[in-house]
Image (cartoon, helix red, strand yellow):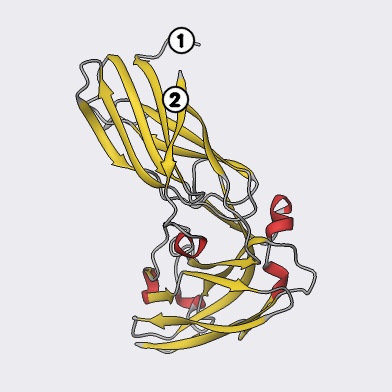
């Protein structure tokens, strides 16, 4: 059973403060072949009709020259709360900024132990509705054609992505914890279960939860405590946020309590009671 309460207003949290960390991605990611991309996330507040220039740095820590190609991509978050990048995602069309961006160069080289700058320009259409839009630039490593003949086996390609969130106007954040469910999980280092918290984002801007999750046994002892998942919750959808339950949750009755600020000026508390093992469906 799920009980939801709005505890109190937290007026100090503003939309600008929310925009400081809308995804869990780090700002710089290193990968095989010595490539590193920075920044991995950019948030912009732009007016309809505005233009903004910027740049990304692609560094090569390997001694050999690296080659890359850039793709302009759509972004979504799947039911496992994992970002997905594709050339086109029809369901993201009304929130996509993919058609607003131009990139120079789209393909190039990074010298060994060096770096190169990739420049981009966003042009926001004059009639763009108020909301937060999202898209990404994907960087794919390319094999050196001079060395391909001498290479054995399969050539691995590396993909890195830099994500963009562009807010036009001042859309109000609107979010609510709608459901908590327990699912079986095939993972021997856990209790064999996970909780899935469903958050509805009914607004037109991104959300990111900040708060705590505690699980207590039937004597009131807290047996698991963690931060609320920090995955970005994109607009106009319900996002599943999985949370693995640890080994301390043996057979018995439990209460899960979540306290979270979803950016709409309220602290929500959701209380969910469950029993392990689960009854067969």
Ranked by sequence position, the earlier of labels 2 and 1 is: 2
x 45%, y 30%: residue = 5
Q: What element carries label 2?
A: strand
- Disc 1 crowd rating (10 Å Cα; few below 14, some 14-19, many 20+) is few
The x, y position of residue 227, in whole percent, is: 32, 44
x 22%, y 21%: residue = 220
- Disc 2 crowd rating (10 Å Cα; few below 14, some 14-19, many 20+) is some
Which mark is on residue 183?
Answer: 2
Res 132 visible = yes
Which mark is on residue 202?
Answer: none
Q: Nearer the viewer, residue 135 or 209?
A: 209
Q: In which quarter of the image is residue 186?
A: top left
Give the total of numbered labels. 2
Q: Which of 55 and 145 is in front in this view?
A: 55
The x, y position of residue 275, in whole percent, is: 35, 14
Q: What element carries label 1?
A: loop
Label 2 and label 1: CA atoms lie apart by 11 Å
Res 184 visible = no
x 50%, y 52%: residue = 232
Using the image, determine if residue 134 lies above or below residue 199. Answer: below
Which mark is on residue 280?
Answer: 1
Screen quadrant of the N terminus: top left
The residue sitting at the right extreme is: 127
Using the image, determine if residue 253 lies above or below residue 158. Answer: above
The x, y position of residue 241, in whole percent, is: 46, 40
């Amino acid at each position: 059973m799920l009980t939801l309460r709005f505890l109190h207003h937290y007026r100090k949290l503003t939309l600008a403060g929310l925009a400081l960390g809308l995804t869990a991605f780090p700002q710089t990611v290193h990968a095989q072949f010595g490539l590193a991309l920075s920044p991995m996330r950019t948030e912009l507040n732009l007016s309809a009709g505005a233009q903004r220039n910027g740049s990304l740095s692609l560094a090569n820590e390997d001694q050999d020259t690296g080659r890359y190609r850039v793709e302009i991509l759509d972004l979504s978050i799947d039911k496992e709360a994992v970002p997905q990048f594709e050339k086109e995602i029809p369901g993201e069309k009304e929130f996509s900024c993919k058609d607003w961006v131009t990139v120079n160069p789209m393909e190039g080289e990074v010298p060994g132990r060096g770096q190169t700058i990739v420049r981009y320009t966003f042009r926001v259409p004059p009639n763009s509705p108020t909301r937060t839009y999202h898209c990404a630039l994907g960087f794919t490593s390319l094999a050196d054609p001079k060395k391909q003949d001498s290479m054995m086996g399969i050539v691995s390609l590396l993909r890195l992505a830099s994500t963009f969130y562009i807010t036009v106007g001042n859309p109000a954040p609107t979010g609510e914890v709608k459901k908590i469910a327990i699912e079986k999980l095939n993972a021997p280092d856990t209790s064999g279960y996970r909780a899935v918290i469903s958050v509805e984002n009914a607004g037109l801007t991104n959300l990111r939860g900040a708060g705590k999750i505690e699980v207590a046994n039937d004597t009131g002892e807290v047996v698991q405590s963690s931060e609320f998942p920090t995955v970005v919750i994109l607009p106009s959808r319900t996002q599943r946020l999985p949370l693995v339950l640890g080994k301390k949750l043996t057979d018995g009755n439990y209460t899960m309590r979540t306290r979270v600020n979803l950016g709409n000026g309220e602290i929500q508390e959701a209380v969910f009671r469950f029993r392990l093992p689960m009854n067969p469906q």
